[in-house]
Amino acid sequence: MKVEAEKSLARQEEETSTGKLALAQVKPDLEISRCQWEDERSRLPTDHIQKTSKLTFFQELEKKSSEWEEDRSHVLDEQMKETFTLRQY
C-alpha cells in the first residue's frame, strides 16, 4: 500500500511539474494577447467618437450648405424684384 501511495504521489508531482511548465510557456503569449486586447478595447470608443464626430461634421456642413443656398436664393429673388421695379420706372 505504501508503495502504491508513493507511486501515486510521484505521478501527481510529475503531472504538477508538467502543468507548471506548460503554464510558464503559455504565460508570455497570454500577456501579449491581453495587451493587444486592451489596446484594441481602448481604441473602440475613440473610433466610435471619431466616426460620430465626422458624421456630425458632415451633417452640419450639409445644413450650412442648405442654409446658404436658401439665403442665396432669397437674395437673388430680392435682386430680381428690385431690377424689375427699377425697369418699370
Image (cartoon, rainbow, N blue to C red):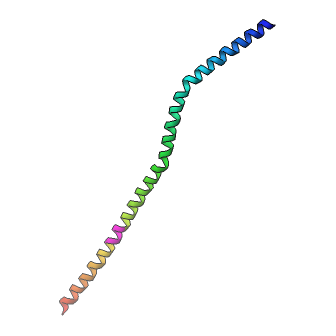
Residue placed furthest toward the bottom: 89
> Residue reaching furthest right?
1
Q: Is residue 29 left or right of residue 64?
A: right
Q: Decide: is 7 above or below 79.
A: above
Range drawn in magenta: 64-68
Percent x, y for residue 37? 51, 38
Residue shown at the point (53%, 32%) measured from the top left: 31
Is 77 placed left or right of 18 in the picture?
Answer: left
Of 47 and 1, nearer the camera is 1
For image coordinates 42% across by 60% down, the residue present is: 56
The residue drawn where x is 24% and y is 82% is 79
The image shows a total of numbered marks equal to 0
Residues 75 and 2: in front is 2
> Where does the image place residue 17, in percent across and percent down from the top left?
63, 17
In which image quadrant can residue 65 be found? bottom left
Q: Quadrant of residue 6?
A: top right
Q: Where is residue 64 in the image (x, y as percent from the top left)?
A: 36, 68
Q: In which quarter of the image is the N terminus?
A: top right
Residue 17 among magenta residues: no
Q: Nearest the camera: 25 or 75?
A: 25
Relative depth, front residue between 11 and 61: 11
Q: Dominant secondary structure of the magenta stretch?
A: helix
Tell me if residue 23 comes above or below residue 59 in the rendering: above
Q: In which quarter of the image is the C terminus?
A: bottom left
Name which residue lies at 74% across and 12% down: 8
